[in-house]
Image: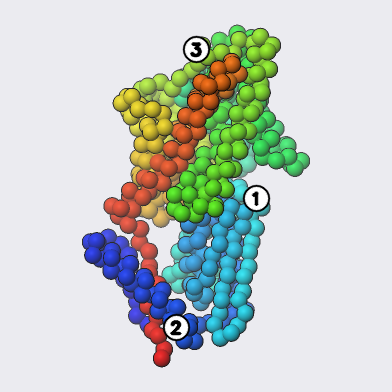
Amino acid sequence: MTSEPVEGEGTPEAGGAREQTRDANEYAAMEAALRGGHEPGVGGEAYVTMDLALRIGELMLAGGETAESVDLALGRITRAYGLPHCEVDVTLAAVGLSYLPRGGRPPVTAERRVRRRLPNYARLIAVEELVRAAARGRLTLQESKFALSDIIGRPPPYPNWLAVTALSLLGAAGAVLVGGGLLAAVAAFVATLLGDRTGAWLGRRGITDFFQMALAAAIGSLVTVLLAWTDAPVGSGSVIIGVVIALIPGRALVVSMQDGIAGDLVTGTTRLVEVLFMIAAILSGIGAVIYLAARMGVPVSLENLPQAPSTAAAPQSLGAAAIAMAFAVFHLVPRSYLLPVALGGVISWGTLVEVRHLDLPAAPATAIAATVVGAIGTAFARWRRVPALICVTPCIAPLMPGTLMYRGMLELTGGDTGQGALILVEALATALAIGAGVYIGGELLRVVRPARRVLRPTRRIRT
């Protein structure tokens, strides 16, 4: 058996040679299979290997990893423990694995369902390290099983109360980002906390995520309406905008665009539909409360609606950093990454502000900012040898189009349906531009410095 070089930098001719080598490897394996070449059959260790791979895939998918990354990880694990050429099937709700042994043996197919998708980026980092160690032959199959068990039983890096508080701090920082003061930040903190805890209470009783999200947005809108009704000296609009920034599913949005652009159309489309339903739930909660408030004569209007300042002033930069850090804590990013994530939030916000000075619309300006932070975050993730999702997703949280969504709903409830629909379409385009920009930033980095992946070794054909 001969070995192939490692894929890395090189000339176009070298890239073409690598493509030809990959094709040769695949055709050689197919020819060997047709001629009855030797390959491990299905025994006890094969079943253990498949179970290990499926559990790894389940943890990665539940943690928010892309379908492409799950596919690559399962392929590395199965090859490391003697099951080459396994077929991996990744969807939003399940991970499937099939293996067809030679010698007339029956095929083996297994699947694990992903019933709860809870973000835990610290666990994703640990799983990535496990897969890397197994692929390099540093762990036996039994050691990998025990290591995965330790990862599953490992306590989260933050207590539950801190994760809950982080989401509320995200809402408060969002209010500051759009020009709200201390009172607006406190009100947004309380509104986000009430919405999140109410949604969690409903979730424990089997209520779907759609209604949980709608009620959380409605509570934030209700706080805004009460502030406007009492003429409180606070920018009431900044409160609901901060709540919306906290509620928008930024993680799922980024991953859905990455899956779709990478070619995993089924998973990407399913994730995107889920994101659209969550956004529809947020808009429904906002619209219902604002409509009732307008019918009751509460002065909720487009006048004096808060706008994000057009300069990277200190309060807004600190707000962007706080949003990124709160998002990271809520998704259980390890403490050692919080400072780089905060810096990434400032970079994303500062880039957006500078690009908007060129009079670009919201969607392309946001796409450019997301591309910049995507490239920088992916480079940092490669240097730290962690999934890029860890270093990129929290940094794009300040770019969420909370103001556009709130303005669009005000237009709709005020009777200007056409203008409101256009603003909501712009908000949706801006949200999609965030996910696309993050992926494009990673791809641009790959053009400059390709990711290093070990090619499959060439198999000699027995005659």
Query: Is the residue marked by circle 3 packed among few (<14), some (14-19), or many (20+) residues within 10 Å?
Result: few
Query: Is the residue marked by circle 1 packed among few (<14), some (14-19), or many (20+) residues within 10 Å?
Result: few
**Residue 304 numbered mark, or none:** 3
Q: Residue at x 41, y 91 (%)?
A: 463
Q: Residue at x 28, y 65 (%)?
A: 16
Residue type of the residue flagged with mark 3: Asn
Q: Position of residue 441 (x, y in %)?
A: 36, 45
The alpha-carbon separation of the residues under discs 2 and 1 comes to 41 Å
Q: Which residue is mark 1?
A: 116
Q: Of the residues tagged 1 and 3, which is closer to the observer?
A: 3
Residue found farthest to the right: 205
Q: Which residue is mark 2?
A: 32
* Relative depth, front residue between 452 and 234: 452
Q: Quadrant of the N terminus?
A: bottom left
Q: Quadrant of residue 213?
A: top right
Q: Position of residue 407 (x, y in %)?
A: 52, 21
Compared with residue 390, is residue 106 higher up or lower down, i.e. above or below? below
What is the secondary structure assignment of the residue under circle 3?
Answer: loop
Residue type of the residue flagged with mark 1: Arg
